[in-house]
Image (tube, grey):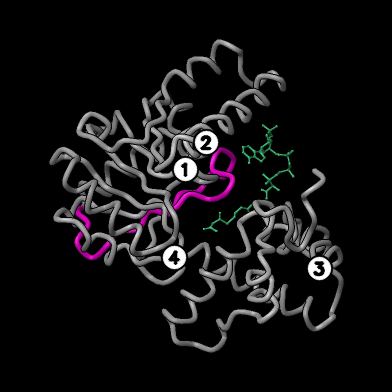
């Protein structure tokens, strides 16, 4: 059954980006967060991103209005809001919060609704176990910034049905993105490769191998990466990078994944990157 209506849970950086992608593909989407202020902030971010596209001549003002008209912001999670074919959860990476969300969704969504999570670190099989519909539960891992990055890792839990995978894979194609099917292992595939690279860059910084700018220049000029690992850590959020490193460390029990003490220190100081105004770079004045 094709997916024709979507609910996104969480109006932060990832949730609002995903809602924008869905609406741009012509699909009605409900964007839900727990406070009206958070919903408004998410919608304002989408409007700003679409406005940039209009300014660049990549979209007309009418197209922008049409995309925005497909997005409904809500706080309540009732039967009307939940009457969708697919839910994409993009809330905090906190198992207790996710349990609360998926228990509520399982109770209020129609029987046919597929539940998915954009988690970057929690096992899909364990999240599916919070619901009575593990066959209709799947991982949909978007990359940041969601409107730009073409990859979606699609992760089957132990009980995910082939029908659920097929419906989500078809949607990913309609969103103009590419599915990579990965198994439910710590860090999936993308973060298993990328997050240890960032962690190693922080070790290089802490050992005085090179400066922040020069470490990033190595990746930009030496590997043709669009941005260096420390700038990328600031974009993702240093707290998220640390959480994923901890997941890899615990998940594999291998000391090669130990988080760099300097990364822990940055997080303890609240130097989380772009979202806090300071990380490896300063953003406050920008
Ligand atoms: N939202 C929407 N669009 C955005 C955007 C955002 N936050 N940031 C940039 N863009 C768009 C710009 O509008 C621009 O679009 P056009 O080409 O249509 O004009 C395009 O992206 C390029 O942007 P800029 O010219 O401003 O800047 P740039 O060329 O330096 O690109 C970047 C910015 C896209 C972020 C690029 O630096 C990049 O690709 N960086 C690497 C990002 C990356 O590795 N992401 C993966 C993170 S890991 C992850 O997400 C998984 C996880 O679980 C942690």
| x and y percentages locating residue 235 in the rendered image | 66, 54
- Give the main secondary structure, helix, strand or loop, of the magenta stretch: loop
Instruction: Give above or below for 217 relative to 88.
Output: below
| x and y percentages locating residue 75 in the rendered image | 37, 36
Comparing labels 2 and 3, the label whose residue is closer to the camera: 2
Magenta part of the protein: which range? 141-161
Residue under label 1 = 15
Disc 4 residue crowd, few under 14, some 14–19, many 20+, Cα 10 Å: many
Residue 7 painted magenta? no
Viewer-closest of 97 and 68 = 97
Distance Cα–Cα, label 2 vs label 1: 8 Å
In terms of image quarters, where does ligand 1 lie?
top right
- Cβ of mark 4 under 8 Å from ligand 1: the answer is yes
Distance Cα–Cα, label 3 vs label 4: 26 Å
Comparing labels 2 and 4, the label whose residue is closer to the camera: 2
Q: Earlier in the sequence, mark 2 or mark 1?
A: 1
Residue name at image x 69 percent, y 52 percent: 274
Residue under label 3 = 215
Q: Is residue 46 left or right of residue 11?
A: right
Residue under label 4 = 121
Question: Mark 4 falls on what kind of element?
Answer: loop
Q: Is residue 198 left or right of residue 255?
A: right
Disc 2 residue crowd, few under 14, some 14–19, many 20+, Cα 10 Å: many
Residue under label 2 = 42
């Amino acid at each position: 059954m094709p997916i024709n209506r979507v609910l996104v849970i969480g109006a932060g950086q990832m949730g609002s980006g995903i809602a924008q992608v869905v609406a741009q593909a012509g699909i009605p989407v409900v964007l839900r967060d727990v406070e009206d202020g958070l919903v408004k902030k998410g919608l304002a971010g989408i409007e700003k991103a679409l406005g940039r596209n209009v300014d660049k001549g990549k979209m007309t003002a009418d197209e922008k209005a049409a995309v925005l008209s497909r997005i409904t912001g809500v706080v309540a999670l009732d039967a009307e809001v939940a009457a969708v074919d697919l839910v994409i959860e993009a809330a905090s990476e906190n198992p207790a919060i996710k349990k609360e969300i998926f228990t509520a969704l399982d109770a209020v969504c129609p029987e046919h609704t597929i539940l998915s999570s954009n988690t970057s670190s929690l096992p899909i099989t364990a999240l599916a176990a919070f619901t009575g519909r593990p066959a209709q539960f799947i991982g949909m891992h978007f990359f940041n910034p969601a409107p730009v990055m073409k990859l979606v890792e699609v992760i089957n839990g132990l009980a995910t049905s082939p029908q659920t995978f097929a419906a989500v894979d078809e949607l990913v194609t309609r969103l103009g993105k590419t599915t990579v099917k990965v198994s439910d292992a710590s860090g999936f595939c993308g973060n298993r490769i990328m997050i240890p690279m960032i962690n190693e860059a922080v070790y290089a910084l802490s050992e005085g191998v090179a400066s922040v700018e020069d470490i990033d220049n190595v990746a930009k000029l030496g590997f043709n990466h669009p941005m260096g690992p420390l700038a990328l850590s600031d974009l993702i959020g240093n707290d998220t990078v640390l959480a994923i490193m901890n997941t890899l460390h615990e998940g594999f029990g291998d000391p090669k994944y130990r988080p760099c003490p300097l990364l822990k220190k940055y997080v303890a100081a609240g130097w989380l990157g772009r979202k806090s105004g300071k990380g490896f770079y300063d953003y406050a004045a920008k």
